[in-house]
Amino acid sequence: MAAPRFEGSFLGDVARLPPNAVLECKICWHVYDPAEGCEYWQVPAGTPFAHLPDHWRCPRCDGARDQFMVIDTSGGTGFAAPSPAAPVDPLPGLAAAAAQRFEAAFREVHVGQMRGMPIVNETLDVRAIGFRPHEGRVVGVLVTPWFMNIVLIPGPEDDWSRLTVGSRTLLDFPSGAYEFIAANRPETGPYRACSLFSPMFEFTSMLQAEETARAALAALFDPALRDDEDEPAAKGPEPTAGGTRRAEPSRRALIFGGGAGDAGGPRA
């Protein structure tokens, strides 16, 4: 007998799902298999659907979890009692909250300080794109009508309260090392930013800007783009007579619109 179709916790009790239940998004057909977990949201293998973090959404189409339906219970009969709750990772919730916080803060800047300024592309809006956990922190792309930056936000184990605004450092990602500049706003708290584009006049629509932001974020995590001569940022910035060494220009610069160059300055 086929397993009953189930749609999240709204048409059934999610707590009664078998721990091994495999579910499928009815929008894009992405499958969540507890045996594999979710690499996008850094959910470890063995996590039942019922124990996913509250902010978990479909990693392919961003659909809500209530759009998922049971497609397999691996031989289970009916619904089972829930297994002990898995430890909750705070980073997905931190990522979702940070995206909302940055959008709200920079929309206020747009309306209150930047509206009508000559460097502003009024075709565009403020949008936080792809904010996600990364090595204990949160990374994403912030799009505004006057800049597009990669943003790195401290995690629960970080203390960036003494971060020197304007200081620059090289940070290592799978595709290479990039220069980030420290920033701090009352509405967002401390963070680091790496400039992708500024100003934004080459974008003719918000859709184009969002697609570029997602492509840049994907490239950031693509190890195939790393040059052999890249040095891990874990070794720290390399001082020179002219200051901190910048990453050398490469084909990544074509993807990032300047790559490891100016990290946004006061625009961030």
Image (tube, rainbow, N blue to C red):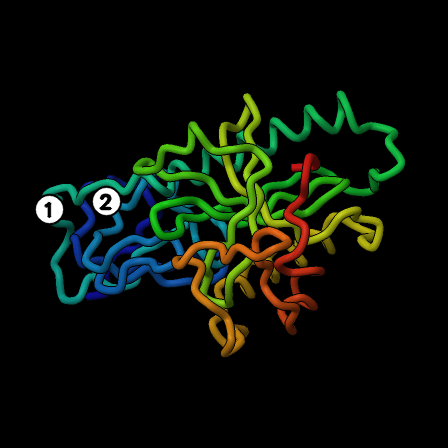
Rendered residue at 40%/59% (across/down)? 235
Instruction: Please tell me whether mark 1 sits on a helix, a strand or a loop.
Output: loop
Crowdedness near tag 1: few (<14), some (14–19) or many (≥20) residues, C-alpha within 10 Å: some
Q: Which image quarter holds the N terminus?
A: bottom left
Rendered residue at 14%/53% (across/down)? 78
Rendered residue at 75%/21% (across/down)? 112
Rendered residue at 20%/61% (across/down)? 73
The image shows residue 117 at horizontal and vertical percentages of: 86, 31
Drawn side of residue 195 relative to residue 89, left or right:
right
Q: Is residue 160 above or below residue 204?
A: above
Q: Which residue is mark 2?
A: 51
Q: Which residue is mark 1?
A: 83
Instruction: Please tell me whether mark 2 sits on a helix, a strand or a loop.
Output: helix
Crowdedness near tag 2: few (<14), some (14–19) or many (≥20) residues, C-alpha within 10 Å: many
Determine the image quadrant of residue 82: top left
Comparing 101 with 32, the one in front is 101
Identify the residue at the far front of this view: 241
Q: Is residue 227 above or below residue 39?
A: below
Q: Are marks 2 and 1 in contact (CB under 8 Å)?
A: yes
Which amino acid lies under the numbered mark 2 shown in the image of this protein? His
